Amino acid sequence: MDGGIEDLLREQAPQVLGALVRRYGHFDAAEDAVQDALLAAAVQWPDDGVPDNPRAWLITVASRRLTDQLRSESARRRREETAAALTPSDGQFAAPPADEQPPDTDDTLTLLFMCCHPALSASSQVALTLRAVGGLTTTQIARAFMVPETTMGQRISRAKQSIKTAGARFDLPPEEDRAERLRAVLHVLYLIFNEGYTATSGADLQRVELTAEAIRLTRQVHRLLPDDGEVTGLLALMLLTDARRAARTRPDGSLVPLAEQDRALWDKTAIDEGVALVTGALKHGELGPYQVQAAIAAVHDEAPAADDTDWPQIVALYEVLERLSPNPMVTLNHAVAVAMADGPRAGLALLETLAGDSRLAEHHRLEAVRGHLLEMAGDAAAARAAYRLAAQRTTSLPEQRYLEDRAARLATQE
């Protein structure tokens, strides 16, 4: 499918879904109908051309699918009673005419809040966000997360049923709940980006379709909430991190660590935008974790070479981040920064504070960082053992190969 048409369909997906849910209610049935309309457009538009009013075309087709579905359901049950309950407010099942002007309301944020409802697990929030707001098909989402399509379909169906059971309404949450729900939305977008940037399993280190979708959706949220520092910080973090994508792998797909990357391959336009965003966010409003992470990424990206990195500044930023959002992954990265600023033994001492943390008990990153710091300290045997253990624990083939290569290289030094 033409890339321009695909981008248009993804842009229109939340607007069309919002129009149907506002008109008919029943998020689950409306979402299925919108997916049918998107698929119909993907088939017809490349041959017939994009209609003058794409949104109205999609609303019309989706409305017809939905009303057909509602009629079918009402026929299977007590037709009149069910039909009355599901009839739109104008009392007719008729789809809106193709030339009806779509509403000006942007429903993206409302849909994101609904897809990130607290009744859902994180994995369900991610899947439903990509489908309902991102406009991706179940097949595309399953492929991105490397799970069977049936598994992903069941996950999405359960998520929609959970929303229905929870009685979620298609409206922004109350003001007192909005900040907490926005944090959930940003966390879901962060999870989508991270899975795309460093895939948790499979042969490829990166899944560009997920990072691109996370950035696109975060841009939409930023457009709607331009003064929110954490929304701005998250967008900056994504841009500053994704800017390094071209340098992170070799032609054979193998991993290139940050210190060895060719910085000429980094995307300077993305870096400039990210730096401008985080600089502006830090000047205004309350400081938050995404802003601090973006500031750390900016320090890395603005260094002309790895040796020019301002590690003391990064250490100071990690200290701030640990106060704002303490978690073991932050401590892991903090330990690396301390090692670079104050020596590997100082980093290893900080790493020891994680020894009893059950959240990292089987995570490969702990042993990978330990191996790196032990290698810096000159303890080749211990570093090799740590690298091998990390390689056993990861399900990412590029990371596994990289860790095994590090261990093999150290074997020649013993």
Image (cartoon, rainbow, N blue to C red):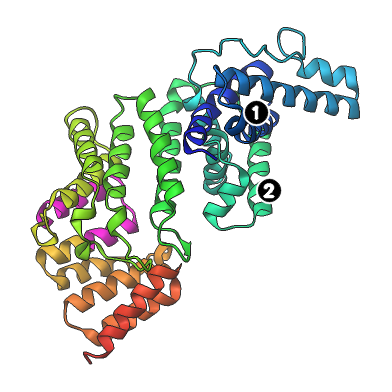
* Image quadrant occupied by the C terminus: bottom left
Residue at horizontal 51%, vertical 36%? 6
Q: Residue 210, relative to residue 368: is it above or below?
A: above
Q: Between 121 and 255, which is closer to the camera in this rendering? A: 255
Residue at horizontal 15%, vertical 69%? 346
Q: Is residue 393 visible?
A: yes
Residue at horizontal 32%, vertical 65%? 250
Give the amino acid at mark 2: Gln
The dot on residue 154 is 2
- The boundaries of the magenta stretch are 311-335
Residue at horizontal 68%, vertical 37%? 161
Give the amino acid at mark 1: Phe
What secondary structure is the magenta-colored segment mainly?
helix
Residue 328 highlighted magenta (yes or no): yes
Q: Residue furthest front?
A: 47
Q: Is residue 117 visible?
A: no
* Numbered disc 2: secondary structure: helix
Whole-number angstrom distance, CA of label 2 to CA of label 1: 16 Å
Q: Residue 21, relative to residue 368: is it above or below?
A: above
* Image location (x, y in percent) of residue 28: 67, 32
The quarter of the displayed image where residue 257 is located:
bottom left
Dot 2 or dot 1, earlier in sequence:
1
* Numbered disc 1: secondary structure: helix
Left or right, residue 289 beside residue 123: left
Left or right, residue 369 beside residue 150: left
Disc 1 target residue = 27
Q: Between 61 and 278, which is closer to the camera in this rendering? A: 61
The dot on residue 85 is none
